[in-house]
């Protein structure tokens, strides 16, 4: 068993700027909000704006570690910018995007560093040795921390009854620990963004926040921001997607265009990458690395950074993917996402 003993480097703080040590470091600089609007700090404000932009466009915030100071300082500045938009979609998206990048980085960290980051959030966590638990388990986490961070994870594997548990501790692989820590980070940032009353902000900051709001409306679309709920509602799926979802979850073979349609649809309604990857797990030729790559590519988190949309109904009809269109399909629908949004509104 091991407890954390490592000291975070400046590079760690740039990579994980939500850590207490990063906040302490920022405090020592005694910066004021007004300073951020001055030309000397323009690099920080620019990077902060970029962080929120990346979150809006690609649901991920890349790390730029060549200038650690700017990277550390741009995190609280980006949090302030997201809060200044007073837009719940942007705030949620920003928290999620930072959490996703954290997951991507944590997966490759040594155990000791994961442990130290977990302890930063007061997790009751220990590493396990080979005698105590067989591979692939590397950590054991107290069930209270486990439950807090699995409430929004819907796959069956996260249910407490499906986990190895001893003396109140849940055994976890390194990947799973990284995933739960990223949930903790998401909740931590969302909490920081719950500011009831904003302080008086310099004009430059409010203007930047306005630019970010316009970008969101332009790229994401007003209807999508307002009409797509945070949680996925399968009841609102159009018939074609219901059929594809069922086929995929039962491991049945689906054509390339059908798979593309299903993945793009799920990405666009906000299903997390992990859940989409898990959906394809039942397939006999399932390859986790490849599936994850494809989903992240479609979500715009890799390569061209374009988030793909599902094809229109007309295209799906041509390719035989349109299945049992119902009355709503026949009345007005020209796109599966339009169907979903309308149905969500009706169900409300
Ligand atoms: S009409 Fe469009 S939304 Fe409805 S089942 Fe066909 S492809 Fe899907």
Image: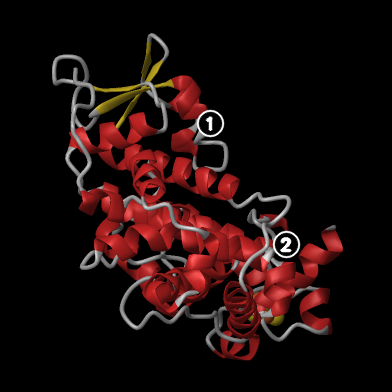
| Residue shown at the point (68%, 68%) measured from the top left | 239
Q: Position of residue 311 (x, y in %)?
A: 55, 84
Q: Quadrant of residue 225?
A: bottom right
Instruction: Kindly identify the residue that appears in the image at 24 percent across and 29 percent down.
Output: 137
Q: CA distance from mark 1 to mark 2?
A: 28 Å
- The residue sitting at 31% across, 57% down in the picture is 286
Q: Residues within 10 Å of mark 2 (few under 14, many from 20)?
A: some
Q: Secondary structure at mark 1?
A: helix
For image coordinates 60% across by 68% down, the residue present is: 241
Residue 58 figure quarter: bottom left
> Left or right: 189 with respect to 85?
left
In the picture provided, is 338 more to the left or to the right than 295? right
Q: Is residue 28 visible?
A: yes
Under tag 2, what secondary structure? helix
Q: Front-most of 261 and 308?
A: 308
| Mark 1 vs mark 2: in front | 1
> Residue at label 2?
236
Ligand 1 within 8 Å of disc 1? The answer is no
Residue 177 lies, with reference to residue 211, above or below; the image says above
- For the N terminus, which image quadrant? top left
Residue 318 vertical position relative to residue 309 in the rendered view, above or below = below
* Label pair 1/2, CB-CB below 8 angstroms: no
Residue at mark 1: 148
User: Residue 327 at what x, y percent from top left?
Assistant: 83, 75
């Amino acid at each position: 068993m091991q407890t954390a003993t490592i000291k975070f480097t400046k590079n760690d703080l740039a990579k994980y700027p939500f850590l207490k040590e990063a906040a302490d470091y920022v405090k020592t600089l005694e910066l004021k909000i007004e300073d951020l609007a001055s030309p000397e700090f323009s690099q920080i404000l620019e990077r902060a704006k970029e962080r929120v932009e990346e979150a809006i466009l690609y649901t991920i915030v890349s790390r730029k570690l060549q200038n650690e100071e700017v990277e550390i300082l741009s995190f609280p500045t980006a949090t302030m910018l997201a809060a200044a938009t007073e837009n719940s979609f942007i705030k949620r998206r920003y928290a999620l995007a930072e959490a996703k990048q954290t997951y991507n980085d944590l997966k490759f960290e040594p155990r000791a560093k994961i442990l130290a980051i977990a302890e930063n959030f007061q997790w009751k966590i220990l590493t396990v040795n080979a005698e105590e638990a067989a591979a692939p388990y590397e950590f054991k986490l107290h069930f209270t921390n486990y439950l807090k961070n699995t409430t929004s994870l819907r796959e069956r594997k996260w249910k407490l009854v499906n986990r190895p548990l001893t003396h109140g501790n849940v055994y976890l692989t390194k990947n799973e620990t990284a995933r739960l820590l990223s949930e903790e980070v998401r909740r931590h940032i969302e909490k920081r963004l719950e500011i009831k009353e904003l302080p008086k902000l310099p004009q430059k900051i409010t203007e930047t926040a306005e630019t970010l709001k316009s970008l969101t409306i332009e790229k994401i679309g007003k209807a999508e921001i307002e009409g797509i709920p945070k949680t996925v509602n399968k009841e609102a799926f159009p018939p074609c997607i219901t059929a594809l979802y069922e086929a995929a979850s039962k491991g049945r073979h689906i054509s390339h265009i059908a798979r593309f349609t299903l993945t793009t649809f799920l990405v666009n309604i906000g299903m997390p990458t992990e859940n989409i990857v898990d959906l394809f797990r039942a397939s006999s030729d399932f390859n986790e690395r490849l599936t994850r790559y494809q989903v992240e590519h479609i979500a715009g988190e890799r390569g061209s950074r374009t988030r793909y949309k599902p094809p229109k109904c007309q295209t799906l009809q041509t390719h035989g993917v349109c299945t049992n269109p119902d009355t709503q399909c026949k009345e007005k629908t020209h796109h599966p996402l339009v169907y979903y949004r309308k149905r969500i509104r009706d169900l409300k």
